[in-house]
Amino acid sequence: MWWRPCRNGHDGTEGDEMESRPGSVFEGSVVCDSQLLAGAELEPVAATAATPKGDPTSHFSVRLCICAALLIPLMYCISMVIFALQVNAFARNHSLEPLRRGTHYLYLDFKAVFSNRASGSEAQGREGAYTLYRAAPPSLGTTQRETYASPNAAVYFVHGNSGSYRQVYQLALALTQQKEVVSEIYTFDFVYQANIHRGRLLKRQALFALEAIEAVEGARHDVMWHSAPHKPAPCIWVVGHSMGGVVVHLVSQALARTELASRVAGVVTLNAPHRYPPIFLDGPMQREYFALWSVRPRNSGPRNSTCGSHPMLSITSGTLDMLVEQQLTQLPPSECSTEAHVNVRTEDPAVCGKTLQHNDILRDGCVVAFVTSVIANNTLRGTSSSERPAVALPSMRTLNDTTAAATPVPRLTFNTFSQWAQKTITGKLLTASAASLYAALVLCATHSLFLTLLREVGSLFGSGALLAHCCSNRGRYSSLCESLCYRCVCFSLMENKVVSVMLGTLFMGLTGWLLLVQLLCCVFPTTGWCSMPWVSDTLVCTPSANWLSLPVRLLLATGPVLLGAWAGVITYSLLWVLLWLSCRLSAGCRSMSHRLMRARNLPLLSHKAHSRPEALLCQYTPLALYCISLFLFALVFPLQPCNRALTWFGLAVLLLPLSNVHQANSLDVADKQQMDTHMCVIVYAFLNLLHLSPFFVWRNMWLSATSDDDSMLDSGSHVVEVLLNILLFAATSQLLYKSTRTEASSPVGERSDHPRVGFSCARTVKLIIASLCLIFVWLSTLMLCAVPVETFRVVTVMVFLAPCVLWELCSQPHTRESVFISNDAQV
């Protein structure tokens, strides 16, 4: 809507023409020259064909911010591409070593020895048909059969996230052909299941591994009790790769509380994220790591019988591992002895003198020989707890080649441009992009409410008209408006959704990390949260850190933060297009129904007058469809949480346009405002789907035939789902509420010309409520961006976001169109 030129109050002549852009912060603010200092405002009139005048400084500031926000993430993406190319080139030039001399490639037979398979069991579909296999050559001689009947060591292997039980193949070949120690090799099959997104799924795999080890060793004990009662039982070794190493860590803690504790010789992990995973996707996963790092070490020397931990060895493949950075593989302090946990790197010349990719550590002959020697040497040392306070490490340069020690270790070097990507990975800054995506979606959803609040505040203090006039006539009132024009530029930046979201996300990420992490933990360093590694690794006030690294770290973080912010803005735009297409489809279906009803001389649905009783069917349709869907998918045919979240998202996209009155070919201002309000509900439904990690869940359903049930989710996820259904109920019943208010306030057949308000409360109370909603949402988003590795905090953001969306639904001005049934309506 544009605005007419106001007239001088003395002679009736027209003053300076002034226009205001619809939806802007100065909408509805018009002043004349003579009324400038008085602050008078005139009433808006019909739109004209004039072109609005914009402030060049404001437009230039907006364009400059958008260009900078585009250039920084673009350069960061180029740095990531160059970094990936250099890593792949280095990996191709340094091939894997074959197995050690004397090790022959044999066919290994995998025989199932324990499983949780139960025909017809409902739990099998949820948990997966987990199986424990024994890997051994298919044909053995008579002497070998007797030897394998009484092994010295039993080795259990746990694969990583989405891994395979056959990844133990090279290690099994080396162990079965080990001459000093006879080993039995067992490998767990978790049916290619991804476990990085669920802490309780990780715990479930650990419980199955514990149950399988106890079953196998219990059966072995029964056999040896009758055949060889005086022969010692074999040592138990547990080996884990990647997230399987975390499962092994949990199994080790559980075994320490069983009768098998004295038989566990040690634990070996390969590229396992013991400090924290690359990203926390749910609360239970964070609690598992919090429990691992809450252990206080004892100064008791060697491990005794009452100790709740076993000797552990963590091996990292070094710089080339882009999935689990080498610092993440460091073991937590042992509650037994400071020497019980050992960390080594394959880049160490005493180990292998090479760096490997994440999964290549299982296939490299040098690493396999190193692990085999660790198991053999420590098994031969004995099983007494007093004889093995820690894992003894062999020298692989002595075992393999005595002249190899003089060979320089190959190093992966990066150029100046790719160092940006490399430092963000090693500095644990890459996960900030995930938190920025969530934050950008939240800021996009609440942007319309923020602008409404800004307009209300501006008009409440009477400064909107003055600022608008100053920005359009800066040359005439330079002395009066110079300072106010800077505020005009700021308002223009906040009015632009892309600029405000980019600046808001960057501001929340940087200030949240400075205030809630650096300042808080430097002032109170003894708090439990600050002592956790995912927080302490980023502190600059520790003795090992340097305060000068703070500005460098802030500059490095701008790339991932803005990249995630752009991903959020693009996602919001795609959701808006999806809602717009649904609106067009709804309008097209309504027009088609009008044509069909007119062809049969039936009452037509029109939106040019008030509704008659026959129109109740149209008003109740969105609410009825929602209630039927809620009854079917929540009670009659209950879906899994992720599929249920997808259903709510689809209902929001399809049903909300039915609550919106709009034309088939175009959308007016009121419809666009209502679409912005509905976008809040759709973004909320999308966030509810996104925080459940649907890609991991659907992958498990496709490859593993396993699905998440409600017991796998945290309690906060159930609260978010309940709030989402409240929002859907409020949104689908909006048309019925509007029609009821219209019929109660206007005669039948007439249209009311005064706008409606959602609540009969004072204007100041409205401002206070809207401000509190935004403050709570922004504070929770600030906490989300402060510690980006904890993206499960999006649940807290959504708990505070729901009242904000509900307020925007209820406080939205009602449109003056309603449904009317007529026999001569125009389509």
Image (spheres, helix red, strand yellow):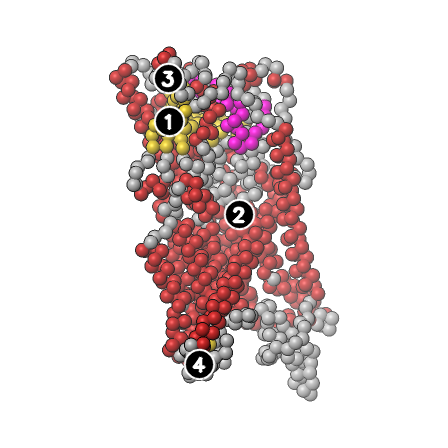
- Examine the structure image and report whether residue 654 is included in the region drawn in magenta: no
Which label belongs to residue 111?
Answer: 1
Q: Which numbered mark, 4 or 1, is in the foreground of this view?
A: 4
In the image, residue 157 sits, relative to residue 230, either above or below, namely: below
User: The disc labelled 2 sits on which kind of residue?
Assistant: Ala
Q: Kindly identify which numbered label has been placed on residue 434.
A: 2
Q: Which is nearer the N-term, disc 3 or disc 4?
A: 3
The kind of residue on which mark 4 rests is Asn
Mark 4 or mark 2, which is nearer to you? 4
Left or right: residue 273 versus residue 402 is left
Q: Which residue is mark 3?
A: 148
Identify residue type, mark 3: Tyr
Q: Are marks 3 and 1 in contact (CB under 8 Å)?
A: no
Counting from the top left corner in percent of width and height, residue 255 is at 35, 29
Q: Secondary structure at mark 1?
A: strand
Secondary structure at numbered mark 3: helix
Q: Earlier in the sequence, mark 4 or mark 2?
A: 2
Magenta residues (range): 353-379
Mark 4: secondary structure: loop
Q: Residue furthest right?
A: 475
Residue identifier under label 4: 823
Callout in the foreground (3, 2) = 3
Q: Earlier in the sequence, mark 1 or mark 2?
A: 1
Separation of marks 3 and 1 at Cα, in angstroms = 15 Å
Q: Is residue 404 left or right of residue 730?
A: right
